[in-house]
Image (tube, helix red, strand yellow):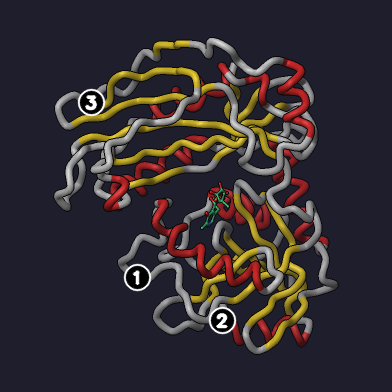
């Protein structure tokens, strides 16, 4: 299989003007402001990966029998490009996204993409839309690589044609409250994933299945839903779009083990940073009952959610059908703040990148 392809570029005929872009960049929120271009690479059984193009962002034309519309073979990634104070452009551990994308592809019976081609596609879009990367402190360019089954066929089988695409949006804070601690809703009725299912894959279907629980969370005045395990409805797993960490009074940091949760790249990075800062880091099951008891007794000092979109968000309160409890002082605790500052400092080039997590885009 070819590991790289030459990208042909057809620049946007009427890109957004510098003035209009500056206005859009003032407050882009999350995921609402598209950049001018997209990258597309096609795959067929006969040709493998081919036809790599950078082109104006435009709608797809899909036949009503396009396989993804019926059997949901779709996977995606979420990553960010940053503008450093010196004006350089960096990506944070993009090789990890390439690896996870291929793990998701395998789980969903889709073709894998050579890591080099995945990274070339990301870099091609970042280069052509570089002016869309916010330079302010909380801003970044959110990149959304995704792949879907494009074969026109209603038989139930892995499709024989796929489209890989990368789009981008300048973004600010994921939560409307900015850096205010978030409130979680514990879902009683719904699970996100079960053993043998697709919980560890970043497939669109996981999110479709989570939306009813997220809507319930929002109805209860919460920012995010937190899921418990499907088998016993006892163990904390993760949020609709983030992993979770607990900071205990003895300084240890607990996070649920991998298996049915998404193996977050932020999670993995936070684990390394916490360990280096002297915390003992435990990947171990933590029950909802224990969580309540520890929050009430003060044994639990802090909890935070983390992910590419949300970065690191302190959890102030947890609500459930039987009541609610607060965590710590209901705001960001010192460990949460220190880990976030370190992560963001590395991403923005303000703290030395000793672990070689950044990849610069020239
Ligand atoms: N869990 C879920 C369900 C997610 O959607 C995300 C976001 O991508 C994460 C965890 C965090 O993963 P990452 O840190 O790689 O963005
Ligand atoms: C991300 O953090 O990249 C995600 O995919 C999660 C979603 C909340 C946007």
Nearest to N terminus: mark 3 or mark 1: 3
**Residue count near mark 1 (Cα–Cα under 10 Å), binned few <14, some 14–19, many ≥20:** few
Q: Secondary structure at mark 3?
A: loop
Q: Name the side, left or right, on which 41 lies relative to 96.
A: left
Given contact means CB atoms under 8 Å apart, are the residues at marks 2 and 1 in contact?
Answer: no
Number of marks drawn: 3
| Rendering coords of residue 212 (x, y %) | 51, 67
| Rendering coords of residue 16 (x, y %) | 65, 18
The residue that label 1 is drawn on is 195
The residue at 33%/40% (across/down) is 148
Q: Name the side, left or right, on which 347 lies relative to 58.
A: right
**Residue count near mark 3 (Cα–Cα under 10 Å), binned few <14, some 14–19, many ≥20:** few
**Residue count near mark 2 (Cα–Cα under 10 Å), binned few <14, some 14–19, many ≥20:** some
| Rendering coords of residue 49 (x, y %) | 27, 26
Asked whether the viewer can see residue 176, the reply is: yes
Q: Tell whether circle 3 marks a residue whose Cβ is less than 8 angstroms from ligand 1.
A: no
Nearest to N terminus: mark 2 or mark 1: 1
The residue that label 3 is drawn on is 1
Asked whether the viewer can see residue 283, the reply is: no
Q: Quadrant of the N terminus?
A: top left
The residue that label 2 is drawn on is 287
Q: Name the side, left or right, on which 155 lies relative to 358.
A: left
Q: CA distance from mark 3 to mark 1?
A: 33 Å
Q: CA distance from mark 2 to mark 1?
A: 17 Å
Outermost residue toward the front in this view:
64
Nearest to N terminus: mark 3 or mark 2: 3
The residue at 71%/23% (across/down) is 21
Q: Secondary structure at mark 1?
A: loop
The residue at 51%/37% (across/down) is 144
């Amino acid at each position: 299989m070819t590991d790289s392809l030459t990208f042909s570029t057809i620049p946007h005929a009427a890109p957004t003007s510098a003035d209009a872009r500056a206005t859009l960049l003032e407050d882009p929120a999350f995921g609402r402001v598209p950049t001018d271009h997209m990258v597309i690479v096609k795959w067929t059984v006969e040709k493998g990966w081919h036809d790599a193009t950078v082109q104006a962002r435009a709608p797809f034309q899909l036949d009503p029998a396009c396989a993804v519309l019926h059997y949901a073979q779709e996977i995606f990634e979420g990553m960010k490009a940053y503008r450093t104070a010196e004006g350089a452009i960096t990506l944070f551990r993009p090789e990890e996204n390439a690896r996870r994308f291929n793990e998701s592809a395998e789980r969903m019976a889709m073709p894998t993409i050579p890591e080099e081609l995945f990274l070339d596609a990301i870099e091609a879009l970042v280069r052509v839309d570089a002016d869309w990367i916010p330079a302010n402190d909380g801003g970044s360019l959110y990149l959304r690589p995704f792949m879907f089954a494009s074969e026109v066929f209603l038989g139930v089988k892995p499709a024989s044609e796929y489209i890989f695409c990368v789009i981008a949006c300048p973004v600010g804070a994921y939560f409307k409250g900015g850096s205010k601690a978030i409130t979680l809703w514990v879902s009683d009725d719904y699970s996100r994933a079960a053993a043998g299912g697709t919980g560890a894959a970043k497939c669109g279907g996981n999110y479709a299945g989570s939306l009813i629980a997220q809507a319930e969370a929002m109805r209860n005045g919460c920012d995010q839903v937190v899921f418990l395990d499907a088998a016993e409805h006892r163990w904390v797993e993760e949020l609709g779009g983030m992993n979770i960490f607990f900071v205990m009074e003895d300084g240890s940091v607990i996070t649920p083990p991998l298996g049915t949760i998404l193996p977050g790249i932020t999670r993995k990075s936070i684990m390394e940073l916490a360990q280096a800062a002297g915390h003992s880091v435990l990947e171990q099951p933590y029950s909802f009952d224990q969580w309540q008891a520890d929050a009430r007794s003060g044994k639990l000092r802090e909890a935070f959610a983390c992910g590419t979109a949300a970065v690191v968000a302190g959890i102030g309160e947890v609500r459930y059908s039987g009541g609610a409890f607060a965590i710590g002082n209901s705001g960001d605790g010192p460990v949460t703040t220190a880990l976030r500052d370190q992560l963001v400092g590395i991403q923005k080039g303000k703290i030395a990148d000793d672990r070689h997590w950044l990849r610069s885009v020239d």
